[in-house]
C-alpha cells in the first residue's frame, strides 16, 4: 500500500485524528501542545499520529490534505485545520459541537 493510501485509511478509520509533532503526553511543539489541550478539553477520546516518528507521513500528508502545516485535525474524515483554526473554533463554541457530533466506533 502506498503512503497516501495509508494516510487516507488512517483518516477514515479514526473519527477524531490529530497529526501532530510528538504525542498528547509529550508534544514536541507549541502548536501540537495547544491542539491536544483543546481536544482533551472537549472530553472525547481522539487518535493521533506522531509525524516526527513517521517521516513518510510527514512528507506526504500535505499532499493528501492540501494543508501545509502541522498539526492537522481530521474529524469524520474531513480536515478541520491546524491549531489556529482550533483556537477560533474553541472561542466560538464550534469545536465542542464538532467533537460532540462524532459517532464513536465501538
Image (cartoon, rainbow, N blue to C red):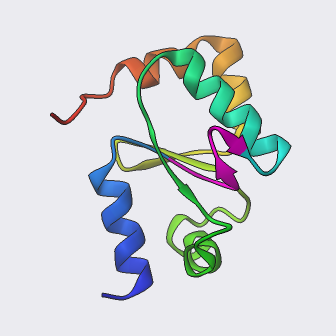
Q: Please, is residue 66 above or below residue 59 in the view?
A: above
Q: Residue furthest bottom?
A: 2
How many numbered marks, from 0 up? Answer: 0
Q: Please, is residue 64 above or below residue 1 in the view?
A: above
Foreground residue among 68 and 54 = 54
* Residue in view at x 33 percent, y 22 percent: 101
| Left/right of residue 28 with respect to residue 21 in the rendered view | right
| Left/right of residue 63 with respect to residue 52 in the rendered view | left
* Residue in view at x 62 percent, y 65 percent: 51
* Residue in view at x 59 percent, y 67 percent: 66
Foreground residue among 61 and 51 = 51
Which portion, as a residue range, is magenta? 18-26
Q: Residue 94's spot in the image, x, y percent?
A: 55, 18
* Residue in view at x 84 percent, y 42 percent: 30
Q: Residue 18's spot in the image, x, y percent?
A: 54, 47
Quadrant where the N terminus sits is bottom left
Q: Quadrant of residue 47?
A: top left
Question: Any magenta on residue 19?
Answer: yes
Q: Residue furthest right?
A: 30
Q: Please, is residue 45 above or below residue 67 in the view?
A: above
Foreground residue among 40 and 88 = 40
Q: Please, is residue 10 above or below residue 97 in the view?
A: below
Q: Quadrant of residue 84?
A: top right
Q: Residue 105's spot in the image, x, y percent?
A: 19, 36
Q: Residue 56's spot in the image, x, y percent?
A: 57, 81
Amino acid at each position: 500500500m502506498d503512503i497516501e493510501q495509508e494516510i487516507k485509511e488512517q483518516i477514515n478509520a479514526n473519527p477524531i485524528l490529530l497529526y501532530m509533532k510528538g504525542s498528547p503526553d509529550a508534544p514536541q511543539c507549541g502548536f501540537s501542545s495547544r491542539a491536544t489541550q483543546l481536544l482533551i478539553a472537549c472530553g472525547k477520546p481522539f487518535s493521533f499520529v506522531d509525524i516526527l516518528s513517521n517521516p513518510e507521513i510527514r512528507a506526504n500528508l500535505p499532499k493528501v490534505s492540501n494543508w501545509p502545516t502541522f498539526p492537522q485535525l481530521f474529524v469524520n474524515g474531513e480536515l478541520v485545520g491546524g491549531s489556529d483554526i482550533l483556537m477560533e473554533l474553541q472561542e466560538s463554541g464550534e469545536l465542542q459541537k464538532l467533537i460532540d457530533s462524532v459517532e464513536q466506533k465501538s
